[in-house]
Image (spheres, rainbow, N blue to C red):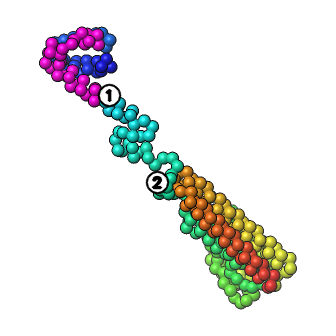
Amino acid sequence: MQRAIPTLLSATRRVASSNVNVTWSMSTRQSAQLFLKVNNTASLPKTMAMALNASACQQFRGYASKKDAKKGGKGGKGGDDGDEDGRKGKGKSSGGSAPSGEMSFDLLDLEKKMGQCLERLKKDFMTMRAGTANPAILDPVNVKVENKMVPLRDLAQVSIKDAKTLMVNVNDVELTGAIEKAIREAGLNLNPFVDNKAIRVPVQKPTKEFRQSLTKLAAASTEKAKTIIRKLRQDGMKDLKKDLKAGMSEDENYGLEKKAQTLHDKYIKDAEEALKVKTKEIMAN
């Protein structure tokens, strides 16, 4: 009750100021002492008594609600339903309950990215041809134009003239010399020459050394692809650990880990098989 005194007096002052000619110049402690001497509000002006009674009821309701909230304890019992619901959902999940929020791991997205990695590897293999004319052979060629390296495919169209010859039709005739030089210095074992307004590129029978270098290049590309696939699996495992902490059940988490590993093994094997096929092709031509 003593705690409520300053609050009650404050409320009384606001009401009394317009109806009672009283000067409140004493401190809170002095006001409290004065209030304790008043045992019956009937002796006060009517407006002051009403304010005191109303403030007391409001203050005591506040104490009662705080007391009820403390009864709930750490378990969150008692209080509003909204508070109880807010305390739920934290901590380790049990009984296979559905996790709250959005999960980090996406199995379909993981498979999509691994598949894209394998497709890029196969496209790289298409540029590694020995002894046969294929426009993809010139995909790695970049041409220096105004101190910038520009892909050949942006400057010309490459077509097949016959089984052993490629034709490069240049968009800007002024770049013909630069394109011829770029093809010659690209390390593709090609000796192009200008034919009218185009560039003729004979595809000669590759030497043993050139076949070996192509094989090494294919192996290096395969290792790069396998490294990316492994990294994708590792990132997926990290996401699964986050999901487990976020509330995913252990059974579901373990099942997704197995599926991620299965995808990893599949695409690693596919990359190795693609390398075997490519190596055989290079050495056969």
For this view, does 53 lie left or right of residue 2? Answer: left
56 or 284, which is in the foreground? Answer: 56
- Number of callouts: 2
What amino acid is found at the position of numbered circle 2 in the picture?
Ser
Where does the magenta region start and end? 32-61
Q: Secondary structure at mark 1?
A: helix
Q: Secondary structure at mark 2?
A: loop
Question: Which label was assigned to residue 2?
Answer: none
User: At 19% across and 11% down in the image, what residue appears?
Assistant: 22
Residue 28 can be seen, yes or no: yes
Circle 2 sits on which residue?
100
For this view, does 224 lie left or right of residue 283? Answer: left
The crowd level at tag 1 (other Cα within 10 Å; few <14, some 14-19, many 20+) is: few
- Looking at marks 1 and 2 on the same chain, the residue that comes earlier in the sequence is marked by 1
The crowd level at tag 2 (other Cα within 10 Å; few <14, some 14-19, many 20+) is: few
- Mark 1 or mark 2, which is nearer to you? 1
Circle 1 sits on which residue?
63
Instruction: Residue 266 in the image: state x and y as whole percent.
Output: 66, 71
257 or 232, which is in the foreground? Answer: 257
User: At 31% across and 13% down in the image, what residue appears?
Assistant: 28
Instruction: Residue 103 in the image: state x and y as whole percent.
Output: 51, 57
Quadrant for residue 66, please give it: top left
What amino acid is found at the position of numbered circle 1 in the picture?
Tyr
- Farthest bottom residue in view: 162
39 or 189, which is in the foreground? Answer: 39
Q: Main secondary structure of the magenta part?
A: helix
Q: How far is the residue under mark 1 from the one under mark 2? A: 35 Å
> What quarter of the picture does the C terminus occupy?
bottom right
User: At 17% across and 22% down in the image, what residue appears?
Assistant: 50
Quadrant for residue 229, please give it: bottom right
Above or below 110: residue 175: below
Instruction: Residue 8 in the image: state x and y as whole percent.
Output: 26, 20
